[in-house]
Image (cartoon, rainbow, N blue to C red):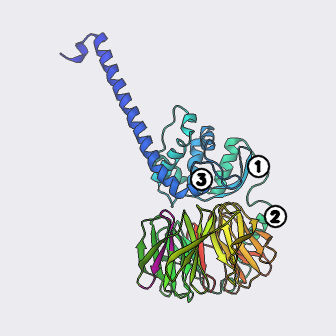
Amino acid sequence: MPLFNFPIRVALPVRFATMVVALGCLAVFSNAHADTSAARGASVFQQNCSACHQAQGQGLPGAFPPLQGHAVDMYKITDGRRYLTHVLLYGLNGKIEVAGQPYNGAMPPWAGTLSHQQIADVLNYVLTAWGNKASLPADFKPYTVKEIAAQAKAKQNGDDVYALREKLSGTKSKSVAGSGAGAADRAAHMKLDVPLHTAVPAPVYVALQNSNDIGVLPTKSTWQGANSAHYVALSADGSMLMASGLKTGAVYVFNTATGKLRGSIHLDDVVQGVKIAPNGKLGIAIGAKHGVAVVIDLRRVKIVKKIPVGKTPHNARFSADGKTAYVTLQGAGAIAVLDMNTLTKVKDIATPGLAAPHNLDLSDNGKRMWIRDFTGHVGVLNLVDGKMLKVIKVGNGHGGIDVIPGGRYVATGAIADHIVSIIDQKSMKVVKNIDVGNGPHGVRASANGRWLYASMTVDNNIAVINMHTLKLAGQIPAPGKFPFWLAVKGND
């Protein structure tokens, strides 16, 4: 019998029951989708975000804001959902305040480094982890790839996102990163005040993380084949370049004469710093996930040995004679010392005052180590007796560090800030903070110490500092996106 001939009191309950079951299935499917996405996002967060915002989203006071609690607070304001996508896609530049704590830095954009799926996943994870889920609105729906892709068409930058944050939160900061006299000086020096070949007398190699290339100055050419290029290191004779791939877990070896890839090795790890021994025969790549220093035969591009070094190693440096290598242990508050003859770990040297040693360099005589940490400090370690001589406050976040040839100065970047700090080696004091732009990370001087280069991860420029005047000489547009690290012939 046709349905329309059934009594209405029978037909409606059947249809209603069917609808209830269908809605229940949709709810289960939606919850399962959210849980799966958040589970993937946990891995994305651990690999890309936890170093700054910390494993439990608690952040680092004064350096990196917390996501625990604060992410949901921002989500719940009008248009907060869109704001969070823009922070991930385009970054954030400027002074903010979270729970009464000021933060004055720069978060880099993740568009290009993370896929739309990864951005959706990590947002879903952050908003449901560490107790955040309990504070979410009842109608919260997980982010989707389609939603992220739509927002990615906005073509904004970190300054635009900062303006959006101020508009949505109804606040107006008194001071913005990169504002004031320093910013005015920087704006006046967007172009070099000297000829390019004067400021860059020898090749400067740039890891272009979001372009998957190695850039070369002053020619502004690029080499392909270094997917997610992260750290780079140059051999003493300038003939070979090593690069680590942040997302690929690979190490790449290039011939600098041709710009061609000689070979690559996949380490099945999160590869961080790389360094080449003074004789050019061996290189070290740091495997942070497994806590190893991977020794590589550069001629054959083959692994020689994986040396266990400790918790969360990050970067390495050879002694001048190549007999010793030093590795920062970001997760252990120490420096691992390696014997390169036996390829074994000899000992750890504690770094009191630096809980998370990040990057490092050695004084010309090899007796002092200058260590950049993850939270805005530089430590001076006496390698003769293993004592920390001084801890110096510098720019926010982490950055590279370089002992400038000539023995007078040390320079360090600050990825969550807009300054490069210049330290006098004798007094161990900051003599000048130079406003260079947003997100300076890698720093490296020319071989004669005349010029200092800083990679601007947010602005996609290479800042050039005149080390005679300690003033910004200008900016060189990077030949790609997210310039992270630098290598210079004669000073690497």
Query: Quadrant where the C terminus lies?
Result: bottom right
Q: Nearer the viewer, mark 3 or mark 2?
A: 3
Q: Residues within 10 Å of mark 2 (few under 14, many from 20)?
A: few
Give the image location of residue 128, x and y in percent.
Answer: 52, 41
Q: What residue is rendered at 66% in x and 65% in y?
A: 373
Task: Tell me whether the residue at label 3 lies in contact with that at label 2, contact meaning CB atoms closer than 8 angstroms.
Answer: no
Residue 114 on the magenta segment: no
Q: Nearer the viewer, residue 270 or 95?
A: 270
User: In this rendering, does residue 156 appear at all?
Assistant: no
Q: Is residue 198 visible?
A: yes
Residue 357 location, x and y as percent?
64, 65
Of callouts 3 and 2, which one flags the residue occurring earlier in the amino acid sequence? 3
Q: Secondary structure at mark 2?
A: helix
The residue positioned 34% from the left and 26% from the top of the image is 21
Q: Which residue is mark 3?
A: 54
Q: Are marks 3 and 1 in contact (CB under 8 Å)?
A: no
> Picture quarter containing residue 481?
bottom right
What residue type is disc 3 on?
A: Gln
Question: Where does the image place residue 463, in percent across and percent down from the top left?
Answer: 68, 73
Q: Which residues are magenta?
A: 285-299
Disc 2 residue type (three-letter): Ala
Q: Secondary structure at mark 3?
A: loop
Tell me the tag on residue 173: 1
